[in-house]
Structure formats: structure tokens, C-alpha cells
Image (cartoon, rainbow, N blue to C red):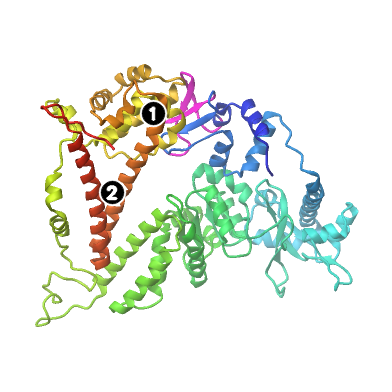
């Protein structure tokens, strides 16, 4: 459902951010704002700020930023419509009515919700009746407490083809609605429709709002064709999109930062009864992409708990294929394997909850389980076999959509392949060719054990007249006589980074529109990073921040000397936008440009590091060519900067002007 901006603004106007956040975070007044410990990251000193006037929160520890809707979505795993509905109720606002064309559809959904709730009550009553004796005996045999049975609303479907149908008809529900809900099997080729679930222990399946939308049934007849039977796909139920116990597990999972995934309904009940209330299970299928995305709303690294037998390993293998494309920084899955032949229910009954805690404490990262899976697929004693393994593993890594995670997986798998080659490559005995004997300095085919001094070799290759001409100059020549403490700061500060901070100090109004971009800048200098963080913290506490106020606040902090340092930065004439007297139009026009240049320099540095690691790892001609190309590109840009410096150098002994672009 789409919401009008006016409706959302009305909710924001009625609910201060501090009121919504204060239910999760202990806030203290700090000037015009509130501060507290981050709900997104463990910390000892408050870095989480709430500004009611501006209508947002900001966490300097994690970079999280948003409004009341974002906060509920981040901390409780709600979808946006759910967050709107909850906050609208709190604000005393009625939700917008659906359009006319959706009224009929909404009416049907409402009827199905009421029908399924009536069915759940019928099954609960049947379990307590005389006909439910066998079902109660089964649940007692499985060791479930009566409180667990009541909490999960377990029930019993009588061994009758029409018991539920008759009950629902008496409640006024039509045969069409019974069939649409999945509770009745009907069709043109079926003369008399009949109940779908018969002589089964019933497990209600709830949506994220706690409404009954489907059922799972466990057969009590030993010769039943299906041990477990789930509701079919309906307008309310799509089994690949939801998880059993998701509505109950969501809040505990957020509080614990952990969600556990097991294979069956009874496993969920046993673990929940033992205190692991953050446990869920797929609905009779292998884990799907949509279910995995739902799990990531609960916790950043769901634990997939499988049996230690062959079937459990195959389930883990399928989960790997589902998860790989969607991995992101800080978002993955972990695996926990039970002892072979034991499921969670058995483990708890035999050894207690502590045994499950031990299993969950020994989780394995996805990359380990992926590596072990591929090693189980064959032997890799020859270069050709290892090359095939290399192709297969790197092909899997290429399915990862996030470039950063994909790069890390490629490096990790390359390193493991290299170690595999060293461990398994055959050694030659005395009298064999040099380099392969026991006393050789060389290992497997993968690469020499003694890494060559490639850095020195490449420096020589790149060295030339241009490099000697444009030798590195002191970035701040005017600071030659500075104090030792200030000089130590200067040695690690680049002119461009100093220019960025100088611009912020002289024009703090930039932070209003660029706070997130500023917070994400990766400074090489730790001194400038500390100064940036202090500026943002002051801005978060001070609504209207001007240069004089900012400088006054900074002078009282531990970064005062760094402020003096950047104030002495001499810039090129085209960089005068950083000076206090520059116009707002000039500053705004130049700001995006200087940030883009900095990001490009940072990206080149990261690319260079990756190329160096690739060359060191692979020693291939392609890797060497790539490394040289990147180095030449960096050298060209440095040369252009030096040329500009010499052109801009004043005569007659005037000070050197260092350009910061």
C-alpha cells in the first residue's frame, strides 16, 4: 500500500523521535538533543544522538541514520507498511482506506483471516476433547509441556471428512471461502468437497502480525501417504516467503542479535521450550531466497542448524547456493551441525539445553562450509585437479553480487588453494631436479615459498626521469619549524584531506546537507578522522552551527592542534573556496568536486592494494600487467599534480603553494 507524504508527515509531527527511540534506548538530554548508547553497536561511550527538531537520529558508531519509521524497521525487522501501521495507531491516526478497486480483494482477505482463526479454535477444542486423546498422547510422548501446547496453539484435526466443514458452515462461511483458504479440497471433478486435514496434530502458521494464515499437520496414521502436510498456496499463504514461528521469534532475535533456523516444527517447539525462543523453520521446503532475506531482517548472520548426517549436509549445500549471491558486508549465514543421527529435539531430551548451546557456540562460517563441500567432491593431488577446483570455486565466488564481498571471497579461496597446493604437492627425493627436493626453497606448483622482492623490482621498472623530476615534496613546507608534536601530525596528512577539513571548519553549514557523505569519508590520517568525528558530534549537539561557534567548541577538545594545523594549509588559487570569505555558491560548487577527487584517489589506492595481492598470490603475466597499469596511472596523476605545483610556484623566494586537488 502506498502512503501519501502528508499522512507520513502527520505521523512524524505527532511522534517525536525521542519518544519512539526512548523505548529501546536510555536517552539523556544533551543541549537541544538527546544522546545514548547505540542500539546498533556495542559501546561504552554514547555516540547515538536524537534530534527531535530535525526529526532524525544518527549513530556515529555504526553510521545508521533515519527517522521514526527507519528506527522501527532497523530495530524490530518490520516492513515499512508495518512500521507505518504501528506508528499511526500510536499517533491516534486511522490508516488510509483502500481504493474502491481493492475493496473486494480486502474483503476476501478479511473473510479468510476470520475463517482460519475459527479453524484454529476448532482444532484447539478438538485436541482437548475426547477425540483428541491420541493426539494428546503423541504430544506428551514428544515431551511438550502444556504451556508450550497452549502458547503455540497446537490442535487436532478429527478423523472425519466433514467435521471442520460443518463447523465453518455453522459459523456462516461459504464453501468457496473454505476452498480458497486451503481448508477444504474441492473442484469440478470432486462430487463432494472434504476436509484437507484429517487425523493430524495441527500446527497453526502465523504471519508476522501473529494472524493464522495456514496450517501444518502431522499424521497420526502410520500408513498416511504424507507424514507432514501443509496448506496449499492461498491468497494469504506463500510457503516460500514465510517461516514457522517468525512472529514470535522476531523480537527475541533482535534483542539477542541471533536467529536459529532448524528443519521442522517439532524442533522449533523443543528449542523454544528450552529457552531458544529465537528459533524458526522453513515450511516444508528447503530454505528459499525470500526466507533468507526475511532472516536477515532478524539478525545479520542467521545460524542454520542442520543434522550432522548426509541429509543435513545436503541441506547445508543447498543453503550455500541460495545465500552466496546475496551476501553483503556484515550479512552472511553461519552453520551449526548436530551430532550425526540426532535432531534438536533428541539432543535436548538426552543432554539438556546446554548441549544445544555448545552446538550453537561452534558455528562455522559460510566460506568454511563451502570449502569443505568442494573438497569432499574429489581428490586434488595434481595441478590439473586443483585447477579444476580453482575454476569451480572462483565461479561460485563470481555469483556474489556485492563487489567488496566477492573480492574478499576470491582472495580467501585463492589463499586456500595455494595452501592446498603446498600441502598436497608431491616432494622429490635426493638427486631430483633443483627446486623440488626436501632442501629446496620452493614448494608446490602454486608459487615459490620465498616471495620475490617484487616491490623493489617494480619500483625500478617505474623509476625514470619523470619520477626523479617529481620527487615527493614536503606537503606543508611552511611547517618546517613546527613543534615535534605538530610535525608528527603533518607527516601523515595529505593536502587534499587537510583541504576537506579546512572547508568544513570554515563553512560548517555544509554538514546540514552532506552529513552522511562526510561521515563516510575514509581519511588516511587518523588525526583528521578524529577531527571529522568531533565536528560531526558538535553539529549533532548544536542545531545552528557557525564557524565561530565550531572553532570555539573545537578549541576545548583534544583536536585543537589539528585545527591549527589545517588552518595553516596553503592552497592553490582555485582552492580558495575553503577560505572563510568564499561565497556559498563557490563553496557548494567546489565541494562535490573535491570529494570526488578524494574518492578517486582512495579507490586507486584500494585497487592498487588488490592488484599487489593478486600479483603476489598468482604471479601471472596478467596480474603483473594490471599492477603496472595501476601504478602508471597513479604516477601520471602524481606527475600532473607536481607539474601544477611547479607552474604555480611563485618567484623571488616566495613560499611554495601546495595544490590540494
CA gap between label 1 and label 2 equals 29 Å
Location of residue 570 with respect to 41 vertically, above or below: above
On the question of residue 351 being in view, the answer is no
- Mark 1 or 2, which is nearer the eye? 1
Q: Quadrant of residue 3?
A: top right
Location of residue 213 with respect to 77 vertically, above or below: below
Q: Earlier in the sequence, mark 1 or mark 2?
A: 1
Residue 389 lies, in percent from the top left, at 36, 73
**Does the magenta-highlighted stretch encompass residue 33?**
yes
User: 255 or 307: which is nearer to us?
Assistant: 255
**Does the magenta-highlighted stretch encompass residue 16?**
no
- Numbered label attached to residue 419: none
**Which residue, given by chain and number where applicable, does mark 2 sit on?**
605
Residue 328 lies, in percent from the top left, at 45, 52
**Label 1: few (<14), some or many (≥20) within 10 Å?**
few
Q: Quadrant of residue 440?
A: bottom left
Question: Which region is colored magenta?
Answer: 23-52
Q: Which quadrant is the N terminus positioned in?
A: top right
Residue 610 lies, in percent from the top left, at 29, 56
Callout 2 secondary element: helix
Q: Residue at x 51, y 62 (%)?
A: 322
> Is 196 displayed left or right of 413 in the figure?
right
**Label 2: few (<14), some or many (≥20) within 10 Å?**
some
The residue sitting at the left extreme is 431
User: 171 or 113: which is nearer to us?
Assistant: 113
Q: Residue at x 15, y 58 (%)?
A: 461
Residue 69 lies, in percent from the top left, at 59, 36
**Which residue, given by chain and number where applicable, does mark 1 sit on?**
586
Callout 1 secondary element: helix
Query: What predominant SS class does the magenta segment belong to?
Result: loop
> Is 109 displayed left or right of 321 in the figure?
right
Q: Which quadrant is the C terminus positioned in?
A: top left
Amino acid at each position: 500500500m502506498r502512503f501519501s507524504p502528508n499522512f507520513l508527515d502527520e505521523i512524524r509531527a505527532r511522534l517525536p523521535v525521542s519518544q519512539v527511540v526512548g523505548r529501546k534506548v536510555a536517552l539523556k538530554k544533551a543541549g537541544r538533543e538527546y544522546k545514548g548508547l547505540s542500539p546498533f553497536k556495542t559501546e561504552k561511550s554514547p555516540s547515538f544522538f536524537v534530534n527531535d527538531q530535525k526529526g532524525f537520529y544518527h549513530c556515529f558508531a555504526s553510521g545508521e541514520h533515519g527517522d521514526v519509521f527507519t528506527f522501527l524497521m532497523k530495530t524490530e525487522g518490520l516492513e515499512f507498511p508495518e512500521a507505518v501501521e504501528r506508528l499511526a495507531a500510536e499517533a491516534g491516526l486511522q490508516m488510509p482506506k483502500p481504493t474502491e478497486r481493492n475493496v473486494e480483494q480486502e474483503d476476501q482477505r478479511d473473510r479468510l483471516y476470520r475463517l482460519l482463526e475459527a479453524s484454529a479454535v476448532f482444532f484447539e477444542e478438538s485436541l482437548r476433547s475426547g477425540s483428541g486423546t491420541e493426539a494428546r498422547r503423541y504430544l506428551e510422548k514428544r515431551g511438550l509441556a502444556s504451556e508450550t501446547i497452549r502458547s503455540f496453539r497446537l490442535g487436532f484435526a478429527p478423523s472425519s471428512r466433514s467435521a471442520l466443514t460443518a463447523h465453518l458452515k455453522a459459523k456462516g462461511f461459504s464453501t468457496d471461502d473454505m476452498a480458497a483458504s486451503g481448508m477444504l479440497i474441492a473442484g469440478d471433478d470432486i462430487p463432494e468437497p472434504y476436509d484437507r486435514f484429517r487425523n493430524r496434530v495441527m500446527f497453526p502458521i502465523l504471519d508476522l502480525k501473529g494472524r493464522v494464515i495456514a496450517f501444518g499437520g502431522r499424521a497420526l496414521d502410520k500408513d498416511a501417504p504424507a507424514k507432514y502436510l501443509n496448506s496449499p498456496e492461498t491468497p494469504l499463504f506463500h510457503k516460500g516467503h514465510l517461516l514457522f514461528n517468525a512472529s514470535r521469534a522476531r523480537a527475541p532475535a533482535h534483542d539477542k542479535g541471533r536467529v536459529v533456523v532448524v528443519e521442522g516444527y517439532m524442533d522449533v517447539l523443543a528449542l523454544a521450550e528450552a529457552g531458544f525462543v529465537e528459533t524458526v523453520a522453513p515450511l516444508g521446503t528447503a530454505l528459499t531466497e525470500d526466507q533468507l532475506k526475511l532472516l536477515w531482517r532478524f539478525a545479520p548472520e542467521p545460524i542454520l542448524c542442520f543434522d550432522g548426517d548426509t541429509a543435513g549436509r545436503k541441506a547445508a549445500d543447498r543453503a550455500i547456493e541460495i545465500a552466496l549471491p546475496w551476501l553483503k558486508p556484515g550479512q552472511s549465514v553461519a552453520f551449526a551441525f548436530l551430532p550425526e543421527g540426532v535432531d534438536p529435539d533428541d539432543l535436548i531430551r538426552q543432554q539438556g539445553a546446554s548441549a544445544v548451546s555448545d552446538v550453537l557456540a561452534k558455528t562455522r562460517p559460510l566460506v568454511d562450509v563451502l570449502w569443505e563441500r568442494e573438497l569432499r567432491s574429489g581428490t586434488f593431488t595434481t595441478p590439473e585437479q586443483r585447477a579444476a577446483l580453482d575454476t569451480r570455486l572462483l565461479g561460485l565466488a563470481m555469483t556474489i553480487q556485492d563487489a567488496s564481498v566477492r573480492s574478499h571471497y576470491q582472495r580467501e579461496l585463492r589463499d586456500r588453494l595455494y595452501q592446498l597446493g603446498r600441502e598436497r604437492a608431491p616432494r622429490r627425493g635426493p638427486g631430483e631436479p633443483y627446486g623440488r627436493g626436501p632442501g629446496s626453497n620452493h614448494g608446490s606448483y602454486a608459487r615459490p615459498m620465498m616471495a620475490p622482492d617484487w616491490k623493489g623490482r617494480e619500483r625500478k621498472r617505474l623509476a625514470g626521469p619523470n619520477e626523479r623530476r617529481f620527487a615527493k615534496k614536503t606537503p606543508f613546507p611552511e611547517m618546517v619549524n613546527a613543534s615535534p608534536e605538530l610535525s608528527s601530525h603533518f607527516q601523515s596528512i595529505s593536502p587534499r584531506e587537510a583541504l576537506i577539513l579546512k572547508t568544513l571548519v570554515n563553512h560548517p553549514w555544509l554538514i546540514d546537507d552532506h552529513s552522511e557523505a562526510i561521515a563516510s569519508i575514509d581519511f588516511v590520517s587518523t588525526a583528521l578522522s578524529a577531527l571529522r568525528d568531533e565536528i560531526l558530534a558538535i553539529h549533532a549537539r548544536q542545531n545552528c552551527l557557525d564557524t565561530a561557534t565550531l572553532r570555539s567548541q573545537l578549541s576545548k577538545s583534544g583536536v585543537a592542534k589539528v585545527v591549527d594545523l589545517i588552518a595553516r594549509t596553503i592552497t592553490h588559487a582555485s582552492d580558495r573556496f575553503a577560505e572563510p570569505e568564499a561565497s556559498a555558491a563557490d563553496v557548494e560548487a567546489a565541494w562535490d568536486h573535491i570529494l570526488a577527487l578524494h574518492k578517486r584517489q582512495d579507490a586507486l589506492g584500494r585497487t592498487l592494494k588488490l592488484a599487489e595481492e593478486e600479483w603476489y598470490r598468482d604471479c601471472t603475466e596478467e596480474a603483473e600487467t594490471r599492477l603496472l597499469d595501476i601504478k602508471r596511472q597513479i604516477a601520471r596523476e602524481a606527475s600532473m599534480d607536481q607539474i601544477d605545483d611547479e607552474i604555480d610556484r611563485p618567484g623571488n623566494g616566495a613560499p611554495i603553494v601546495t595544490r590540494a586537488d
